[in-house]
Image (cartoon, rainbow, N blue to C red):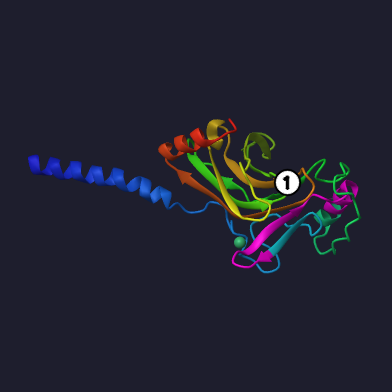
Amino acid sequence: MKPHSTSHILLSTSFIVLCPLLLIAGENLVKNGNFDEGEEFALHWERADGLTSFFENEEGRGRIVKMDTLVDRDQALAWAKAFKADTTLKPPKKTPIKQKSYGSIGGNEGVMLDSELIDAKPGQDYKLTVDYKGDGKPFVWIKGFLIHPKRKVLVDAYQTRLEPGKPSKTEWRTFSIGFNPTKNPRVTKFKVRLYSYWPNGLYYFDNVKVEKITKEEMSELVAKRSIVE
Ligand SMILES: [Ca+2]
């Protein structure tokens, strides 16, 4: 029996070693996280409205998301409503507004763009990564949902956010956080929300990634994180 026991131990050891490697090379759970899939607009993302949010191309990156928070609030809200009802409408020309005006969408609701829903695996830790450059610090939210038992609609049940530490106005930098949406065990779905607000200006996003990570990676990310969940 002895040789058998030895090989069993060896197999177990290699299994333990391989597991974290497989997880590091984890697939991106955000569909079309680089925004490059799709013709006129990025597939699997909410539609950019052409006044406050845009899908643009940048050399070497393919498609990216740009947000402009220096848009008159009333105009932005009216357009958001019209665009939601009919996405074939042409975006209006921006109403002029002062750079530091609090009457902007950036000084109020902010501008946002959501990913599709992702299934939350119970107990699983995840890493969110995003490339960012722009005039201010955006938030990249993780919004978790439970399904209302009677009404069968999604209900907010978890949220956390990535806030870039030292973003640059002109150079792309990469930022990450760890998160676990099933900290609230009733959460079954989550999504990513790109969000920018103040100061008024331009905010750029690319390569949004959510991947499964090990407990060890999670501990490292939590230790690095300045914002406590
Ligand atoms: Ca891209």
Q: Position of residue 118 (x, y in %)?
A: 57, 47
Residue drawn at (63%, 68%), measured in percent from left and top?
59
Queried whether the magenta region covers residue 101, the answer comes back as no
Q: Is residue 197 above or below residue 95?
A: above
Residue drawn at (91%, 55%), measured in percent from left and top?
95
Q: Is residue 73 above or below residue 37?
A: above
Q: Is residue 19 above or below residue 179?
A: below
Q: Is residue 176 left or right of residue 8?
A: right
Queried whether the magenta region covers residue 72, the answer comes back as yes
Q: Quadrant of the N terminus?
A: top left
Q: Quadrant of the C terminus?
A: top right
Which stretch appears magenta? 57-80
Q: Is residue 214 left or right of residue 83?
A: left
Residue drawn at (36%, 49%), measured in percent from left and top?
21
Name the kind of residue labelled 1 in the image. Ser
Residue 10: in sight, yes or no?
Answer: yes
Along the line of sight, which residue is nearer the eye, 182 or 26? 26
Q: Position of residue 167 (x, y in %)?
A: 64, 47
The residue under label 1 is 196
Q: Position of residue 78 (x, y in %)?
A: 88, 50
Along the line of sight, which residue is nearer the eye, 112 or 132? 132
Residue 148: in sight, yes or no?
Answer: no
Q: Is residue 169 left or right of residue 220?
A: right
Q: Position of residue 12 (x, y in %)?
A: 24, 42
Q: Respond yes or no on whether mark 1 lies under 8 Å from ligand 1.
A: no
Disc 1 packing (10 Å; few <14; some 14–19; many ≥20): many
Q: Quadrant of ligand 1?
A: bottom right
Label 1 residue SS: strand
Figure disc tally: 1
